[in-house]
Amino acid sequence: MGNIQVALLTVLMFFLLVSLHEWGHFYFARRAGILVREFAIGFGPKLFSIKRGETRYTLRLLPIGGFVRMAGEDPEVVEIKTGQTIAIRIKDNRVTRLYLDRLDERSDVLRGEIKAIDLEKHLYVTLDVDGDVERFDVHPAALLIARGQETQIAPLDRQFGQKPVGKRALAIFAGPVMNFLLAYVLFALYIVLQGVPVDNPTKILIAHVEAGKPAAAAGLEKGDWVKSINDTPIGADVQLFIDKIEASVGKPMNWIVERDGVDVPIKVTPDPATGKVGVVPTGEARKPGIGETIKFAGTSMVDMTERIFEGFRKLIFGEFKLDDLGGPVKTTQLTVEIAKQGFAQLTMWAGILSLYLGIFNLLPIPALDGSRLLFLGIEAIRGKPIDPNRESMVHFIGFAMLMLLMVVVTYNDIVGLVRH
C-alpha cells in the first residue's frame, strides 16, 4: 500500500470503530424517546458541526473516542428563573422560542417578566407583559436562545433519567455490543480474505515483504513459494523456516523460490542487528465455506477475548511496565505498520481493536459504560436511583483520571519515538 492509502485506511478504521460504538448509544436512545443533544467524534474543541433534526453532529480536535450527549444526563447549562425578563415567539398558540438576551434586537416577539415557568412537566410560562399577566403553553420542542446558541428544551419524558432502567441500560450497553458485532464481521472478512489452512499442507508462501528490509532488497515478493534454503527443502515446516534464518544472522543465504511456475534463486542476508529478513510466512490456504467462516470467526472472537483478559490480568498484577503500555500515538504507529502488510492484516487488527474497545468499555471504571451500567444495576436493586450529583461526580473523577492516564501514555509514546 502507498503512504496515502495507508493513512486514509488508518483514519477510516478509527472513525469506524468510534462511530459505530456511539451510533449504538444514539440509536437505542432515540428508540427509547430520549432527546440526543449531540453525537460527537473526538473530544475537545469543535472542528466541524452540523445540526440535523434534534441532534448536533460534531467532529472534535482530539481523536481519542467520542460521546453521545443525552438530555438529563448532566445539568442543563441554560437556566431561566422567575423575575427574569425574556422574549417569546408564539406559533399556533404555543411558545416555540424563548430569547434570553439581546431582547431589543428580536422582532415579532412578546417581551415580559417571568412570573412562573415550567419547561419539564407542565410546559408553560407565565409572563407579566406591561402589567398584564398571561399564561402561555410551551411547545415540547421549543428552543432556548442565549449567547447565539440554540438549546432545545427537554420535557421529563425526553430525559435519560426518566426512562425505565431497562431502556437506559440498553442505550448504554448498545455501544459495546456494536463493537462486538463489528469485530465478528471483521474476523469473518479476514478469514474470507486470508483463507483457511489446507489439510496436509506442503508449502510455505511469503504473505508479506517489508519494505527496506533484506528480503525486499534481495527481490523476494509476496506470493513466492519458498522451496529450499541453503539446499534444505522447507516443505510446510514454518519452524524450520524460522530456524534457518536465525542460524544465518549476518550470513548470506541461498533461497530457491517458485514464482509463476519458475524456480528463482534468491540470495538474502538476515539483518545482523535483528536477525530477521523482513518477511511474513504463511501456509497454504483455501477459500472457506459459509459454515467455516461463521465457525472460525467465533473461534477468533473467543481466543482474542481470552488474550485481552490475560493482558488485563498482567496489568492488574504489575507484570506490565509503563513502557509496555501504548496510547493513541503508539496505537496509530502500530496500525500504520500493520496496514502496510495489506488489507487483510488491517482487517484483523481492526477486529481486535473493536473487540478490545467493547470489552474495555464494559469494565466498571468510572466514566466508562460499565460503570454507568453498574449504577443502573444498583438502582434496579434499590428501587430508586443514586443521587445524580454524586453519580456525576464519580464519572467526572473517572474521566479526569482516564484523561490523565492518556496524557501519561501519550507522553511515553512520544518519548519512545524520539529515542528511536
Image (spheres, helix red, strand yellow):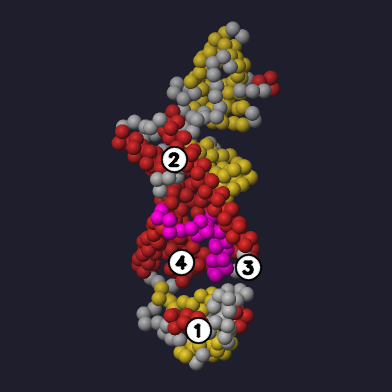
- The x and y percentages for residue 177 are 41, 51
Q: Where 268 falls versus 406 (above or below)? A: below
Location of mark 2 (residue): 29
Comparing labels 2 and 1, the label whose residue is closer to the camera: 1
Which is more N-terminal, label 1 or label 2?
2
Label disc, if present, on residue 190 of the rendered structure: 4
Magenta span of residues: 316-342
Comparing labels 4 and 1, the label whose residue is closer to the camera: 1
Asked whether disc 2 touches disc 4, contact meaning CB atoms under 8 Å apart, the reply is no
Location of mark 3 (residue): 2
Q: Residues within 10 Å of mark 4 (few under 14, many from 20)?
A: many
Location of mark 1 (residue): 247
Asked whether disc 4 touches disc 3, contact meaning CB atoms under 8 Å apart, the reply is no
Q: Amino acid at mark 2?
A: Ala
Q: Secondary structure at mark 4?
A: helix
Which is more N-terminal, label 3 or label 4?
3
- For the residues labelled 4 and 3, the Cα–Cα distance comes to 21 Å
Asked whether disc 2 touches disc 1, contact meaning CB atoms under 8 Å apart, the reply is no
- For the residues labelled 2 and 4, the Cα–Cα distance comes to 32 Å
Name which quarter of the figure residue 315 lies in. Answer: bottom left
Q: Amino acid at mark 4?
A: Tyr
Q: Residue at x 51, y 90 (%)?
A: 230
